[in-house]
Amino acid sequence: MHPFLKHSRFGLYLLAWIPLVAILIYVMGARGKMGWAESAGLVLPLCGIYAAVCLGAWYPVKGAPLDATPVQQLALTHLTAAAVLSLLWIQLAKGLAYVLSRVPEFVEIQEHLAPQLPILFGAGFLLYLLSVSYHYVIFSLEASHEAEARVMETSVLAREAELKALKAQVNPHFLFNSLNSISALTSVDPAKAREMCILLADFLRMTLGLGEKNVIPLGEELSLLDRFLAIEKVRFGARLKIEENIQEESRALLVPPLVLQPLVENAVVHGIANLPEGGCIKLSSQAQDGRLFLTVENSFDPESTATRRNGMGLVNVRRRLEGRYGSEATIQANAAEDHFRVELSLPAETGDASK
Amino acid sequence: MSTTKKRLGALIVDDEDLARVVIRELLSPHPEIEILGECANGFEAVKTVADHKPDLIFLDVQMPKLTGFDVLELIGTDVPVIFVTAYDQYAMRAFDVHAVDYLLKPVGKERFEAALERAKSRLGEKMPAPQELAAAARPPQQFLERLVVKDGTKVTLIPVAKLDYAEAQDDYVALASQGKKHLKQQTIVGLEACLDPSAFVRIHRSYIVNLERVARIEPYGKDSRLAILADGTRLPVSRTGYARLKSLLDERK
């Protein structure tokens, strides 16, 4: 579809014609024997028609894009079109002059027009070329808008896919180690093995289900963490100690799913697992003044190096918080002596999690 | 000396109780194997190997402080090791490349038997060079974060940031860190390959220096220079070494 017809650009196009028409009326009226009235009476309808005709320049412009057409071909196409259209246009001018000469005031218009025809031809030629250039500008604007829109669309899709992938991550290490623990328990403590199977199944089920949701009540995230930590507790035994300090009212507040799980997993993998004697993971939540404060703290080996402490988990959670809350949420990680602490602060949202 | 029916001493090293339980259980139908001990971390493992000289070691890869690779590096290459790991694509690839046997958790009986047979048949064979194995198991673009050194039975960990320089001494490298020198059995070429090339420069055939420690460079003799470290140590810089040092310092500007 012609781009001028679907946008407000049509008005702009007509507006651009006004000064050109004025100049043409002036040139025709000031030169030779033609009077102002004759000039205006002839030029106004002529230009109205020509403005409509020049819209047709869109098609050769589209057919010969600037970057994909040789210069010679470009010149040939548009110069020929300009000459042909301009010739037709002056024929139209003659016809119009013939019609106007029937009006008493314009009896001599045909004689007055004859010497002006070369000027009119030149004007028609130039006007068409102007229209072609204008179309080229619009054409490339359209193309760049489209490209921009495509880029935007792709990045939005990529972001969504990324967020989805971030949510659904279950660490293969965790899975294989848990299975290994179960395999050991089957002979030593079959009842415990069964319990562990159920914990693992619950954990997997909850994790899979959460991928679909945008927010869940904090309580749900915490019960997922209970499963996770119960499984890790079987693996690490006395090396893993857990302290929870959860404010009851905060359980109903909404958080993005799996916002704490990667942090707690980090606390285990980069904290407890690196300590031969083990350590403690502290979880706390508190709602205050419209904000929800969450912290995950763990013991860690200060001799283990920094890159191992800041795994993907933290980056992952930060990105997801930014995605949902923008600058409304903050996440801070601090390592102090033998403790690593991550603090989250987000808007305390209430409502229906299914939305 | 008769070797018939001599029982083989095995050592199980894993930081998780339950993981050791599995190996012990899988070994129980094998009267020819005697479990010499179980270790919950790498330090214990290094000490127990020195004390009991086992014939076979089941070694977990992911352990606190000292990994399975560190342990192998410290105990030498005379004892067959069967690595045990949960999931580590790079380690598995390294094992394949170096034909070291390994078991994946959870460990199955058949696979375990096969590994055990293979280990028995290879008794007395040397393990591949531990540094090569460890280097192959490192994810690409990752460099060592710390070095492990053994002095008798004492194990020292040196974070690479605390390494001032390394000096080649025959088959060993002397690692200078915080005013002390630690000898480690490794070539300087091997060490160079494990260190982050944007932080450590080979300034001389026999020297690698931590760029952070270099205070200034002084001309010395016709074609060579001296690197003066922050603590006053003077190290020779060869012509090619100077070129490397200079390009690295230019990059940092």
Image (cartoon, coloured by chain):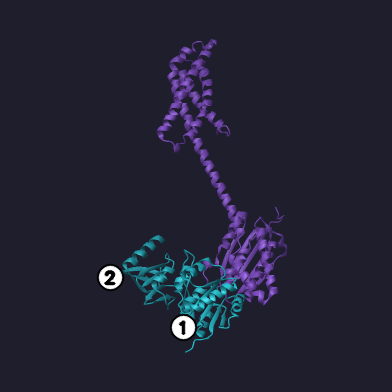
For image coordinates 49% across by 38% down, the residue present is: A140
Residue type pointed to by label 1: Gly
Percent of width and height locating residue A35: 49, 15
Q: Which residue is mark 1?
A: B152
Position above or below: A27 against A234 = above
Q: Nearer the viewer, residue B203 or B39?
A: B39
Q: Is residue B183 left or right of residue A327?
A: left
State the cyan chain: B
Colour assigned to chain A in the rendering is purple
- Few, some or many residues within 10 Å of mark 2 (<14, 14–19, 20+): few
Judged by depth in the image, the label closer to the viewer, 2 or 1, is 1
Q: Is residue A185 left or right of residue A63?
A: right
Residue A290 in view (yes/no): no
> Farthest residue toward the bottom?
B1
Percent of width and height locating residue A209: 67, 58
For image coordinates 49% across by 76% down, the residue present is: B72
Q: Is residue B138 left or right of residue A201?
A: left
Residue B196 in view (yes/no): yes
Task: Find out whether the residues at labels 2 and 1 contact each other: C-beta distance under 8 Å.
Answer: no
Q: Nearer the viewer, residue B72 or B93?
A: B93
Q: Nearer the viewer, residue A33 or B188?
A: B188
Position above or below: A222 against B46 = above
Percent of width and height locating residue A236: 62, 74
Q: Earlier in the sequence, mark 2 or mark 1?
A: 1
Q: Which residue is mark 2?
A: B221
Percent of width and height locating residue A190: 69, 74
